Image: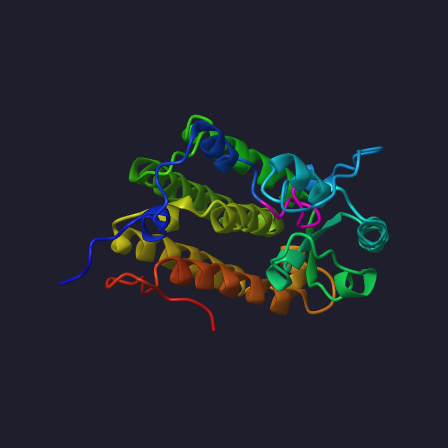
Amino acid sequence: MPSKRKTKEEKEGITSPSPDKQQKKKSKPSPSPSKGKSKKEAIVVEEEPEIEFNEENENNESAIILDDIPTEDEQKFEKELEETAKKYPGSSIFLTQTWDEIQSDPLVRPTLEELRKLDYILVPQKFEDFNDSVYQKLDEAVDGLIILNTTSSHIMHDFFNKELQNFVKMWKSPDKHDEAFSYLFAITVIAKEMDHWYVDYEEVRAINNLMNSFHSRWKEVFTKTDEELGLKGENSRNKLMKYLIKFANSVHEANESYDDKPKFQWFK
């Protein structure tokens, strides 16, 4: 008999989060529209007093702020991305791979050479607007706070299903396929990063249905050429596919301890 599905927090023995922790859950997803970094990460904090990491403050949240201050190499990399984007008018760069996927230790910062190895794609600039608007609508749908319970997951499921329907309507206009692609990508990025809907949910069938919907929409999108989609850059389609596969893997990994594991169609 299938085991009762538990939240990620219950599996790890974590009790209900405090209000300040819940508030952090609503933060805007990373990657951000342009370069795969959250807006907070993009802020350069000048003259911030250095905090030494030691046993006394290793758990102090004020110490973690150092991780949000771009290093010289990170600033150089960001400028390089900006220069690359200028070569493709009307496009924005989106990192489909981030440093924290390679190195989980927040104290280990990447070198410029390591950053240059990260995958990115060039998508229509419209993606940035769609990413902001879809996130804003999600924020309003959950009333500004995603609480770690199944109710919030239900709201998010309804939200993403409606957004996919909005994509279908947009896709029907052949002259708007690039906009529709950007819209679907924005929905997908937020669905991947705001993972509560598949981490804390008791109905695996609903997870399967939503992921199958994502798959069918993307399958239709990939029938069009890169030019029709406004997708530019070297191997952008393959890099995008790898990003979608990571999305599916995240859903599987979040539910791997359950007897009733998600089973949905996806790309290989």
237 in relation to 159, above or below = below
Q: What is the residue that sits farthest to the bottom in this orientation?
A: 268
Magenta stretch containing residue 36, yes or no?
Answer: yes
Residue 39 in view, yes or no: no
**Total labels drawn:** 0
Which quadrant holds residue 251? bottom left
Q: How is the image coloured?
A: rainbow
Front-most of 83 and 250? 250
Image point (56%, 43%), residue name: 29
Q: Which residues are magenta?
A: 30-39
Image point (53%, 31%), residue name: 136
99 in relation to 64, above or below = below
Residue 46: x %, y % from top left = 83, 33
Residue 119: x %, y % from top left = 69, 63
Is 11 on the left-hand or right-hand side of 37?
left
Residue 126 in view, yes or no: yes
Residue 262: x %, y % from top left = 31, 62
Is 194 on the left-hand or right-hand side of 107?
left
Q: Main secondary structure of the magenta part?
A: loop
Residue 114: x %, y % from top left = 76, 65
110 in relation to 18, above or below = below
Is 229 on the left-hand or right-hand side of 49?
left
Is 227 on the left-hand or right-hand side of 71?
left
